[in-house]
Image: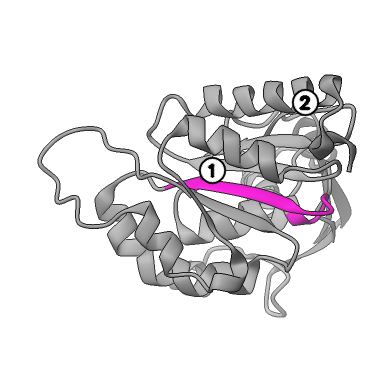
């Protein structure tokens, strides 16, 4: 990808063919639409244009689709055959996986995002199709939380819109003798008070926080890695939103 400085440097070193939006890309790639439900971009080959229309939203997914297309072209596959295959790609579990959308328009998404750049990709993608994003992130260990702390402190205030909401779930602990000298409460405290960052000590508290925050038209985004119960949490949050809608709760009718 010529738009990634590190990848471009490696590519030049081995004389690889590049693609992307960067001016010097061997094969220009223009992102036409990154969402809210699909992504669409155009590869401009010497032989003509190829449109990539993929079922996954997000600029990062389009970049991945373009990379896959370039591999296929290098292997001698027909451009239109590549495009057809990518248009049917079902995606990967926990990569912006839509759990469901309630009748009131609350969409629940489960995503494996677990570092700053992956959070950026997931949240930006969610913002493209939602009035507000109600995001929850569970760091996947004490070491990673310690390592990412300053980066997250700088990233989140710049990334989240004024209406978006964010909550840290407590750090996933898989056991062992790791130093437990950082907590999600500390990470939440790093953020400006105006953000009203939430903190949830466990998954039950996450569900309660989301139930209080989510409104019709919102995308609820659950992010994290390692914890095998995160998909169950996302499903439970969706079920909670469905139940709230049936009861006609204030949150479901605003």
Marks 1/2: CA–CA distance: 22 Å
Mark 1 or 2: in front is 2
Which quadrant is the N terminus positioned in? bottom right
* Element on which disc 2 rests: helix
Residue 63: x and y in percent read 67, 55
- Residue pushed farthest bottom? 23
Say whether residue 205 is magenta: no
Residue 47, compared with residue 77, is above or below; it is below
Residue at image mark 1: 223
Q: Name the residue under label 2.
A: 244
Binning the other alpha carbons within 10 Å of mark 2 as few (below 14), some (14 to 19) or many (20 upward) gives some
Judging depth in this view, the residue of 209 and 227 nearest the camera is: 209
Which stretch appears magenta? 127-138
* Quarter of the figure with residue 233: top right
Query: In the image, 240: left or right of 32?
Result: left
Task: Report how many numbered discs are placed on residues in the image.
Answer: 2
């Amino acid at each position: 990808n010529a738009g990634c400085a590190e990848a471009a440097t490696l590519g030049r070193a081995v004389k690889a063919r590049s693609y992307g939006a960067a001016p010097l890309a061997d094969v220009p790639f223009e992102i036409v639409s990154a969402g809210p439900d699909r992504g669409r971009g155009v590869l401009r080959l010497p032989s003509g244009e190829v449109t990539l229309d993929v079922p996954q939203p997000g600029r990062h997914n389009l970049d991945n689709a373009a990379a896959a297309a370039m591999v296929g072209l290098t292997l001698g596959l027909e451009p239109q055959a590549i495009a057809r295959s990518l248009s049917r790609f079902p995606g990967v579990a926990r990569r912006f996986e839509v759990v469901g959308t309630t009748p009131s328009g609350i969409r629940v998404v489960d995503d494996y995002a677990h570092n700053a750049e992956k959070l950026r990709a997931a949240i930006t993608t969610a913002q493209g199709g939602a009035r507000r994003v109600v995001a929850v992130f569970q760091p996947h260990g004490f070491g990673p939380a310690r390592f990412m702390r300053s980066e997250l402190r700088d990233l989140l205030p710049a990334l989240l819109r004024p209406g978006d909401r964010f909550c840290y779930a407590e750090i996933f602990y898989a056991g062992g003798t790791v130093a437990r000298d950082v907590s999600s409460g500390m990470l939440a405290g790093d953020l400006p008070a105006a953000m009203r960052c939430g903190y949830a000590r466990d998954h039950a508290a996450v569900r309660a926080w989301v139930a209080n925050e989510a409104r019709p038209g919102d995308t609820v985004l659950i992010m994290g890695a390692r914890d095998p119960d995160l998909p169950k949490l996302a499903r439970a949050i969706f079920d909670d939103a469905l139940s709230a809608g049936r009861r006609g709760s204030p949150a479901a009718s605003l």
